[in-house]
Amino acid sequence: MNEATRPTLLIVEDDPAIREGLELTLGLEGYHTHAVVDGDQALAYLGRERIDLVLLDVMLPGRNGFEVLREIRRRRLDLPVILLTARTDEADKVLGLELGADDYVTKPFGLAELRARIRVALRRVAPALLTPAVVAFGDVAVERAAHRVRRAGEDVPMTAKEFALLAYFLDQPERVLTREALLDAVWGLPHATLRTVDNFVMRLRSKLEPDPEQPRYLVTVRGVGYRFSPTGQGEPPQ
């Protein structure tokens, strides 16, 4: 995500450990985050700021999450709302969905699952927030729709698999990706090997890195895999 298209999330959660954990994790994912502790604060915030998605705890002090959701929809605000709750009753889930929730996540939840649900909800209402037309790092510009890569203004030839691997890295900045995960996501072929991933990363480095022997953007995480660092602050492999 580039700065201009980073989605803004409002976290409505009175438990400080969960609230702070979500702020940290989602901030590292590239989202702008704001956090409040009750429904009145949430509604006041929505009245004055642009928000792209709300993570809304059901068991809040004062107005509960269902009441806050009802008011959001009464105001005809169409932004996605994902309910967070420790309650597992099917009736509660049905009520939340009938009131206009986009999704319902039961605590304790896995962060990977929550991230996926956020992306699905945002993609449904505003896909451009997640797939900017051009992604830039260093002197490289990647035009996603055109499958075009330019470096210092010059076209960089890319095979389909090279571009697919690069695009996968761009979608997950600063996340450590295992070779197995990259192999499954880009190739998905039983006869491909982990060495295939290494070879393709080397090819991308030779085309995009200022010094392929000391990579700044496609960084090796020894014993695990690779990490894409769009700021160019990645540590070179030791």
Image (cartoon, grey):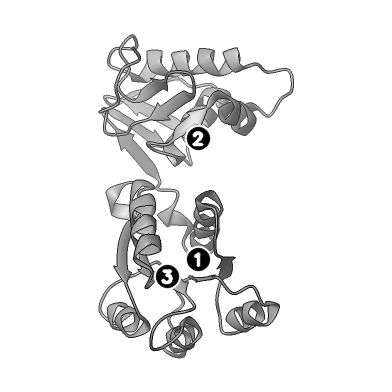
Mark sitting on residue 82: none
Quadrant the C terminus occupies: top left
**Residue placed at 35% from the left, 27% from the top?**
150
Q: Which residue is mark 2?
A: 168
Crowding around mark 3 (Cα neighbors within 10 Å: few <14, some 14 to 19, many 20+) is many
Mark sitting on residue 125: 1
Q: Which residue is mark 3?
A: 54
For the residues marked 1 and 2, what is the alpha-carbon distance in whole angstroms? 22 Å
Task: Give the SS element for disc 2.
Answer: helix
Q: Is 79 left, or right, of 35 in this rendering?
A: right
Task: Give the SS element for disc 1.
Answer: helix
Crowding around mark 1 (Cα neighbors within 10 Å: few <14, some 14 to 19, many 20+) is some
Q: Mark 1–mark 2 contact, CB under 8 Å?
A: no
Q: Position of residue 58 (x, y in %)?
A: 49, 78
Q: Amino acid at mark 3?
A: Val
Q: Is residue 9 above or below residue 96?
A: above
Q: Is 20 left, or right, of 158 in this rendering?
A: left
Is residue 78 among what the camera can see?
A: yes
Q: Using the rendered view, name the quadrant where residue 109 is placed.
A: bottom right
Q: Is 197 left, or right, of 236 in this rendering?
A: right
Is residue 1 among what the camera can see?
A: no
Crowding around mark 2 (Cα neighbors within 10 Å: few <14, some 14 to 19, many 20+) is some
Q: Amino acid at mark 2?
A: Tyr
Task: Give the SS element for disc 3.
Answer: strand
**Residue placed at 42% from the left, 70% from the top?**
54
**Residue placed at 32% from the left, 85% from the top?**
40
Q: Position of residue 210 (x, y in %)?
A: 27, 16
The mark closer to the camera, 3 or 2, is: 3
Q: Is residue 215 above or below residue 132?
A: above
Q: Using the rendered view, name the quadrant where residue 124 is placed.
A: bottom right
Q: Is residue 123 above or below residue 189?
A: below
Q: Amino acid at mark 1?
A: Val
